[in-house]
Amino acid sequence: MQTAMLCPFPLEILDHIVDHLHDEPTALKTCCVVSKSWVPRAQKHLFAHVEFHAQKSHIELWKKTFPDPSNSPARHTRSLFIYGVPVVTAADVGVGGWIRTFHNVVRLRFECIGEEDHRVTLVPFYGLSPTIRSLALVSTSLDIFDLVCSFPLLEDLALVSLHSNTEADGWNPPSTSPKSTGSLYLRTTWEIRSVTHRLCALPNGLRFTKISLGFPIEGAEPVMSLVSRCSDTLESLNINCFLLLGAFPLVSIVGQCLTTAHERRNAWRAFA
């Protein structure tokens, strides 16, 4: 009887038990110190979502904890958020760098938090993970559409408060672009024309099913052109149009844009 009790459970049973703790990080950490055989399954859940904050020195802590990038738990990460892009160096994203070990990421978010962050190029992150289906860019430069096009399976795109470094007409679209069959979330002010210009120029077209837009009334015309590109696939449309008073947006006339959309395609369901 004692020998039988010492026999380990089948690995698939142990994995199933650990899976039930997927939203209990404290319990998962305890599993890691109970048995080495429990570590891989516990790490799968502990590192499914990873965030790096520049102000909290998360990247330095990650490098110290996992000095060998090839043996880090980054392969388990499905959702990766990076706040403060300048803290990521060229060596971090190069061959053998720790960033490239996040090759199974499905959701990726970049958010610039400093005045100088807008000017930082995101070129090193092109094609970071071929599995990415959701991308969010907040307060980054407008020069990010090559990055967007480097993820062939991308479905959902969120663009918030973009800042322009170059003229939109100077952008040369690549030969391919992502699927764009999910949702588009767009909130920006001064650069709305440039953003819509680049989105409409994507070579594979736009097939978003859900669109949520926030823009100044001056950008209504190019925005409606963007919406019309998705008229065959669009299922849900949310428009928040505002007037600009200096640098301050005033929430205002939503009905004008909704009426225009209704006239273009009566089947559109628009929500203010």
Image: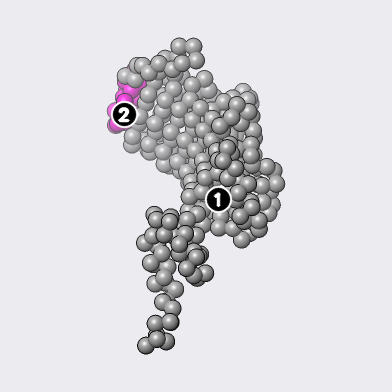
Q: Would you name the residue on which mark 2 appears?
A: 270
Q: Is residue 49 left or right of residue 231?
A: right
Q: Which amino acid type corresponds to the residue marked 1 in the rendered image?
A: Pro
Horizontal and vertical percent for residue 191? 53, 23
Q: Is residue 139 visible?
A: yes
Q: Is 244 included in the stretch rendered in magenta? A: no
Horizontal and vertical percent for residue 146? 60, 37
For the residue pair 69 and 232, the one nearer the viewer reads as: 69
Q: Is residue 25 left or right of residue 69?
A: left
Mark carried by residue 61: none
Mark carried by residue 130: 1
Assign the C terminus to one quadrant of the image. Answer: top left
> Which segment is the magenta one?
256-272
Q: Quadrant of residue 252?
A: top left
Q: Which amino acid type corresponds to the residue marked 2 in the rendered image?
A: Ala
Say how many tags the image has.
2
Horizontal and vertical percent for residue 228? 41, 29
Disc 1 packing (10 Å; few <14; some 14–19; many ≥20): some
Q: Secondary structure at mark 2?
A: strand
